[in-house]
């Protein structure tokens, strides 16, 4: 008879995300992961597989949650520029403790670049989902005249994605929410 798991899988995965976000894949020891997850080595292997499998599952969940949060922040506002600004400002306004942990998605790109196909697939998928949401806002803003007709939509999507990534790195480096909100507003102003 199989033993009943004595831990919350979702909480354990969340704890692993915290460790990977702070230390990256290579910098996260199995012992540190087990301590944070509050599980035994055998439970980790039985539930998540090896460290790499755990990392990939954590990255997938992190990316899904992160992109969903940003997209949801866009949905709560009327005009295209308001929606884009709201998403960037909402990110900038996250608690300092949360922002200082770092972005697991940006960390994965910095650590692996394009050298790991599984990681690249996960980061590409998250980027594509976010890119589609931003593209809809840019197209709506161009159609309404809210965004300058001189703006290239593809370039604007790339610019806003790079701005968000830069804000994530800046937050990890200690940038205050006020500084991040200023960056967000400057980015939006450049689209007018």
Image (spheres, rainbow, N blue to C red):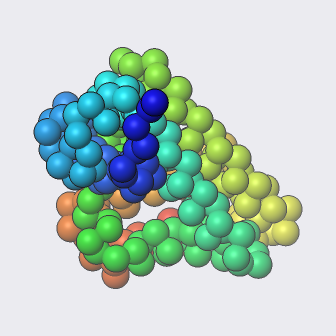
Q: Residue 175 versus residue 123: which sits nearer the camera?
A: 123
Q: Whole-percent x and y of residue 25? A: 25, 34
- Quarter of the image containing the C terminus? bottom right
- Side of 154 where 167 appears, left or right: left
Q: Residue 85 occupies which quadrant of the picture?
A: bottom right
Q: How many numbered badges does the structure rendering display?
A: 0
Q: Residue furthest bottom?
A: 178
Q: Residue 150 versus residue 38: which sits nearer the camera?
A: 38
Q: Residue furthest right?
A: 143
Q: Residue furthest front?
A: 1
Q: Whole-percent x and y of residue 90? A: 50, 74
Q: Residue 82 occupies which quadrant of the picture?
A: bottom right
Rendered view: 149 above or below 130: below
Identify which residue is drawn at 14% across, 39% down.
Answer: 31
Q: Residue 8 versus residue 98: which sits nearer the camera?
A: 8
Rendered view: 25 above or below 33: above
Q: Residue 82 versus residue 123: which sits nearer the camera?
A: 123
Q: Is residue 150 visible?
A: no
- Side of 91 where 192 appears, left or right: right
Rendered view: 24 above or below 72: above
Rendered view: 65 above or below 84: above
Q: Whole-percent x and y of residue 180? A: 37, 72
Q: Residue 100 occupies which quadrant of the picture?
A: bottom left
Identify which residue is drawn at 31% across, 35% down.
Answer: 44
Q: Is residue 86 visible?
A: yes
- Side of 10 where 173 appears, left or right: left
């Amino acid at each position: 008879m199989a033993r009943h798991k004595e831990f919350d899988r979702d909480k354990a995965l969340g704890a692993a995300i915290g460790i990977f976000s702070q230390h990256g894949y290579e910098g996260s020891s199995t012992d540190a992961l087990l301590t944070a997850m509050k599980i035994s080595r055998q439970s980790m292997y039985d539930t998540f597989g090896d460290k790499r499998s755990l990392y990939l599952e954590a990255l997938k969940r992190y990316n899904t949650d992160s992109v969903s949060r940003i997209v949801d922040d866009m949905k709560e506002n009327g005009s295209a520029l308001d929606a884009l600004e709201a998403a960037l400002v909402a990110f900038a306004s996250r608690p300092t403790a949360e922002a200082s942990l770092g972005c697991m998605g940006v960390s994965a790109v910095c650590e692996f670049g394009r050298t790991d196909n599984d990681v690249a697939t996960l980061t590409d998928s998250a980027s594509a989902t976010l890119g589609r949401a931003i593209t809809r806002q840019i197209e709506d803003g161009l159609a309404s005249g809210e965004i300058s007709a001189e703006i290239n939509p593809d370039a604007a999507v790339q610019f806003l994605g790079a701005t968000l990534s830069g804000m994530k790195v800046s937050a990890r480096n200690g940038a205050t929410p006020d500084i991040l909100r200023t960056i967000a507003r400057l980015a939006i102003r450049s689209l007018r």
